[in-house]
Amino acid sequence: MYDWLIVGAGFAGSVLAERLARRRGERVLLVDRRPHVGGNAYDRLDEAGVLIHQYGPHIFHTNSEAIVDYLSAFTAWRPYEHRVLAMVDGMQVPIPINLDTINRLYGLSLTSEELEAWFAARAEPVADIRTSEDVVVSAIGRELYGKFFRGYTRKQWGLDPSELDRQVTARVPTRTNRDDRYFTDTFQAMPAQGYTRMFERMLDHPNIHVMTNADFRDVREVIPHRRVIYTGPIDEYFDFRFGRLPYRSLRFVHVTRDVARHQPVAVVNYPQTDAYTRITEYKHLTGQEHPKTSLTYEYPSAEGDPYYPVPRPENQALFKRYERLARAEADVWFVGRLATYRYYNMDQIVGQALAAFRHIDAQLGRPAPA
Ligand code: FAD
């Protein structure tokens, strides 16, 4: 008899398995239907021996010291500040848009103060900001919107920004200085030996039994357990009884090239050309030395694994119906991005799982001695 059946070995499920086993001394069966642990953060050596991220680039960044402290028990860190370029008008320029982006794109030599005025002169006032297009056009004007946002958004969501809720592009981060870091969090780093190694250390405990290639549906009736933590899709748990929650998916094409370096930074976005949205070169992230290099091309698609919840009010309303069922479910906790139908970064999911643990611990009281 397991104390817990935990569904999903991503950050949500693994953090909870670790806490319940180590802190409460309870017996955990952690299942994942994929052939590995780590969820979407899973990384592996490819055929050439280059460390790649199977489900697209995962860069760790947070402002929470508590979350860094927690994860640091399972990994050392490699300092890494993420930088992204966008291929626009045949040039690779920094994104978020900064002083260098505009000066290079337009052959100017503006100062920061002049750039502020330059943006202000182009911004188009929009009385009622409703769509993603309104957000961007009102901040930086129609021309930059066309160069950087329209095509990218159309590829990413399969919809024009004018059809997407304003929350999709809640904010357009533009900078009038030369800061070209993609994130500004106080802690930005990669697990020194990769994410999968970090997960393996987290789950290395005699009370945790990991079963991969195992679907919840196939084990729930046959493996005795007292309680469940479910980090899979919430609509699937309830057999899609109100219909499916829509997601946008991605197709990842991994390639290895016989050159040491392909591009100047880890990620280059393609807002204007090509069917893919971006190319990632992993050696920038991992610091690995290798005579070859491995890349991932990302092609957004309507079909495939659930990656990005489609942010529309009617989808939130549908989620709320499932959430009401979830609240009424005895001895089952719903945690993680798929169970809460929301895009979260990794640090947020670690925070959510640690909070869920505190809640469970308080609710159940001290476990009975074995
Ligand atoms: P997941 O990692 O998705 O884990 C859920 C697991 O549950 C999966 O392994 C799945 O196989 C399993 N599962 C589901 N249903 C069942 C079932 N019925 N039976 C058994 N197993 C099941 N975050 C960042 O902080 N930085 C980034 O740079 C970043 N980049 C990203 C890039 C992409 C392309 C995507 C899609 C996401 C990115 N994220 C990033 C977000 C990050 O992936 C998530 O925050 C994190 O993976 C969430 O962890 P989770 O445990 O909730 O879900």
Image (cartoon, rainbow, N blue to C red):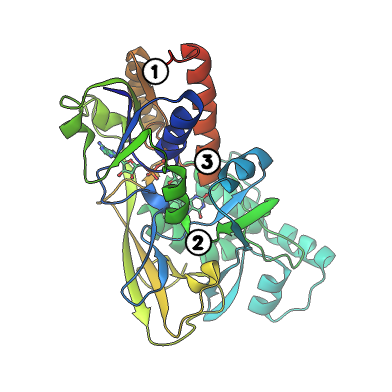
Q: Position of residue 8 (x, y in %)?
A: 33, 39
Residue at disc 2, secondary structure: loop
Residue at 36% over, 78% down: 256
Which of disc 2 and disc 3 is earlier in sequence?
3
Q: Which residue is mark 3?
A: 167
Q: Which sits earlier in the primary sequence, circle 3 or circle 1?
A: 3
Which comes sooner in the sequence, label 1 or label 2?
Answer: 2
Q: Quadrant of the N terminus?
A: top left
Q: Nearer the viewer, mark 3 or mark 2?
A: 2
Please state which amino acid type lies under the numbered disc 3.
Gln
The residue furthest front is: 370
Q: Nearer the viewer, residue 70 or 148?
A: 70
Does 20 sit above or below residue 287? Answer: above
Q: Residues within 10 Å of mark 2 (few under 14, many from 20)?
A: some
Amino acid type assigned to the residue bearing label 1 in the image: Ala
* Residue 336 visible in the displayed image: no
Q: Amino acid at mark 2?
A: Gln
Looking at the picture, how far across and down is residue 228, in whole percent?
33, 24
Tell which tag, 3 or 1, sits nearer the viewer: 1
The residue that mark 1 highlights is 370
Residue at 51% from the left image edge and 27% from the top image edge: 23
